Image: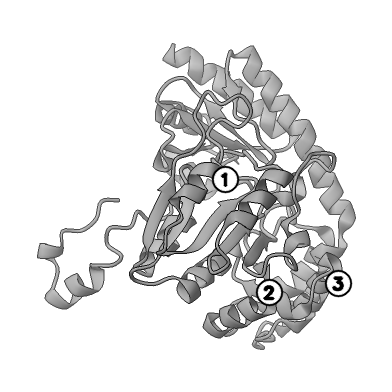
Amino acid sequence: MSAPNNSQLNPWLARACTQVCGLAPYVPGKPLDELERELGIQGAIKLASNENPLGPSPLALATMREHAASAHLYPDGNGFKLKQALAQALGVAIESITLGNGSNDVLDLIARAFLGRDQAAVFSEYAFAVYPISTQAVGALAQVAQALPADHAHQPYGHDLAAMRAAITEQTRVVFLANPNNPTGTWVEKDALYAFIASVPADVLVVVDEAYIEFVDDDADFPNALAWLEVFPNLVVTRTFSKIHGLAGLRVGYAVSNPQVAEVLNRVRQPFNVSLLAMEAAVAALNDTEHVERTRELNSAGLAQVRAGLADLGLSALPSMGNFLCIDMRRPAHAVYDGLLRLGVITRPVAGYGMPQHLRVSIGTEAENARFLTALKMVMGDLA
């Protein structure tokens, strides 16, 4: 979507638009019903938005049914029950938690609370699209650090921590760092991330976005940034129930931080920003460890299945610790995306992230992964 021409707007609207009209809006994955309506097909599959192919936790579904009759009541504006459950599950103080309408909402709260004009946020090239949107929406400057090169031995297109540290200036108030990163799937290892946070000035907030951390292999040298909250008062960790817990449609996420930071965030948080059903479902999902483990096992097998299928086609994907793969199509990826759509398979082009030759595909069920690979083989044959 192109920015409007301010000269064509009413004067009052042109003034209001100065700050936000240059923003590129977030583009979500194409909805299933929209594709089926456009093409007149049925039975399409969506592998575009990193959703849980198993659906919500069965415990969460039962809880939503139980509480549906209370939907006429406002939720607890403080979210005490969910905060208490999170505090117990994560081993943190309840005063450290800020709830959000998805973790996107929490990221936006951070920008609203700690950024403004003549201030700046640092984040990496190829990082989550919400970081520049939230930064620029409050009039702050986006300081984008160059990512690791495409031919890097271990983390192509990954975060270059040295470049991110060098990008921090006196204007910088917030650093956003996704681990694992979306859309690449790349990650920063424990010692490197700890050293980076330690190097950041104490008056700069470091936000570690861990939306996909539950998919990480337990044996990996992967940091759990929550363990460092007492070491770094300027650290904020954000997480979500949208991914492994399968509650993307309910919109519930959270941040964990120093209580003083949480107090500031809760001052700008909208009242009732998380619904009654979302909070009840999230509490139940926290307790459904069986669903989490089933999802993790399905994802691990699916990553191997899709990687093997890509290798048969002469293609490869970036390293990933998430529930998706970012595939190098070795050609403009939008033609592949369009071809897959016509076969009823929705994936995600990432040209908007500056990666026009890559396509991101979510890991689905075994049958969905097989259908994707079959369709991809057909499309690649047609484009040859």
Point out the frontmost of discs 2 and 3: 2
Determine if residue 29 is in view.
no
- Which residue corresponds to mark 2? 258
Colour setup of the view: one colour
Q: How many marks?
A: 3
Query: Which numbered disc flags the more N-terminal residue, 2 or 1?
Result: 1
Does the CB distance between marks 1 and 3 fall below 8 Å? no
- Which residue corresponds to mark 3? 88
Residue found at the far left of this picture: 7
* Above or below 29: residue 41: above
Label 2 environment density (alpha carbons within 10 Å; few <14, some 14–19, many ≥20)? many
Q: Say which residue appears at 81% left-offset and 73% top-offset.
A: 87
Residue 231 vs residue 328, the one in the foreground: 231
Residue 152 vs residue 204, the one in the foreground: 204
Q: CA distance from mark 2 to mark 3?
A: 17 Å
Q: Position of residue 50 (x, y in %)?
A: 62, 46
Q: Give the amino acid type for the residue marked by disc 3 in the picture.
A: Gln
Q: Say which residue appears at 56% left-offset and 85% top-offset.
A: 267
- Which residue corresponds to mark 1? 182
